[in-house]
Amino acid sequence: MSDQRPNIVLVVMDDLGYGDLSCMGNTILRTPRIDSIAGDGITLRHMYATSAVCTPSRAALMTGRYPQRVGLPKVLSPEHGTGLSSWEYTLPRMLHDAGYRTAMFGKWHLGCRPEHYPTRHGFDEYAGLLYSNDMHPVELFEGDRISTADVDQATLTSTYTDHAIDFIRRNADAPFFVYLAHTMPHIPLHVEDEFAGRSAGGRYGDVVESLDHHIGRLLDTLGDLGLADDTIVMVTSDNGPWFEGSTGGLRGTKLHTYEGGIRVPFVARWPGRIPAGSVSDEPACLFDLLPTLAAQAGGAVRQDRPVDGVDISAVLTGGQAPAPRTLYFFHWWTLNAVREGPWKLHLDRHPRDLNRAQGKELPQLFNLELDPAESYDLSHGHPEVVGHLTGLAARFEAEIAEQRPAAEARAAGRATVG
């Protein structure tokens, strides 16, 4: 890409499904502003979250590392004392160290003790909820303090966007990073009166179309300030949909390591650098954003710890990934699935069932190029592939098990060094 350091806007929805955008094939919901990002840039059709639930997915996004290495493999609740350790070198910290002004607006969900707050991990400014909107109490923070405990959730999408627009206007003369982590469409669903009843997709559709509108406001702000060509804009989700929403025909939903739970929509634009209207089927993962943005922002990736993400700049510009890769998908500390090339092997699942206990179904092997819906198990016809991926899984699970005590100690605040 260019030598010029771009501004960065990263929008992450909560529980938005792979098939919830019209640019991903949805014929019910209308998302013209997000679609315009795809039209002006690239759609990554094989983008993955590292987890099918919130906290571990966001831990990986922030650190470039599997959440098991971070000690945050499962969803945190407000009463939990664990959270993102100060030892972790985060995406906002990396960009801050590279000279960026950094801000986050929206859902954090990486711990709610003061040492876990976003402003302790590289963000200059923060406003939002520290955890999911179905957890109590629902409190809106600004910086390190509660600004209100009487939150009207119908206004959250517009409020977060207002904060992001204000930050961009105040920092238009220097490189900035905005992480806009929308609370919606996580349940309970809330939407402004202006959008209520407008979508053919019911309340869920109203919420998604409201999100699209407010993302459009951000795009308009960048255009009005003359920053559109100098800004990478990325839109994605933290995992698959829950009780509503579309997986685009993929198997499973949130909580599952089938494709519907972990494959997420991802569109990005950077005019003049990312070719307009391009599409890639190269496998990528949200933890790739840290090394990719480090490469574009002049930042550094720490060499004193495993970093699992890779620089996918070449993919964004229409090329191929630098090398073949293996991706691992866990439920908590249990390795459920492995993907390498077109092959995906399922070794375990959540929730476990009688078929699993009796050994009747697993392992399952799918060719995702032929069968993205994971409908037809090919394990009996390809024992060499099953053996290869099982060996990779065993080695990686052993590596994670060895690191687990230190990772858990850091997340619990019992250790501050590696």
Image (cartoon, rainbow, N blue to C red):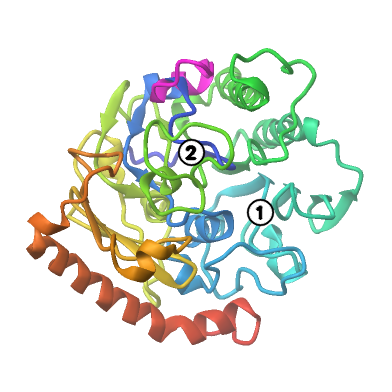
Q: Is residue 7 positioned above or below 345 on the image?
A: above
Dots 1 and 2: beta carbons under 8 Å?
Answer: no
User: What residue is disc 1 on?
Assistant: 108
Residue 143 in percent (x, y) is at: 78, 54
Residue 185 in percent (x, y) is at: 63, 36
| For residue 193, side relative to residue 339 (left or right) | right
Residue 118 in percent (x, y) is at: 68, 58
Which amino acid type is marked by label 2?
Thr
> Which residue is rendered at x = 59% and y = 39% of the image?
243
> Which residue is rendered at x = 51% and y = 48% of the image?
254
Q: Quadrant of residue 23?
A: top left
SS type, badge 1: loop
Q: Which residues are magenta?
A: 23-36
Q: Quadrant of the N terminus?
A: top left
Label 2 neighbourhood size at 10 Å, few (<14), some (14-19), many (20+)?
many
| For residue 11, side relative to residue 195 (left or right) | left
| For residue 408, side relative to residue 48 (left or right) | right
Q: Within the magenta stretch, is there residue 27?
A: yes
Q: Nearer the viewer, residue 4 or 112?
A: 112
Q: Nearer the viewer, residue 379 or 393?
A: 379
Q: Is residue 130 positioned above or below 266 on the image?
A: below
**Chain-order first, disc 1 or disc 2:** 1
> Which residue is rendered at x = 30% and y = 39% of the image?
373
Residue 90 in percent (x, y) is at: 53, 62
Which amino acid type is marked by label 1?
Trp
SS type, badge 2: strand
> Which residue is rendered at x = 21% and y = 50% of the image?
377
Q: Is residue 368 positioned above or below 89 on the image?
A: above
User: What residue is disc 2 on?
Assistant: 236
Q: Within the magenta stretch, is there residue 359?
A: no
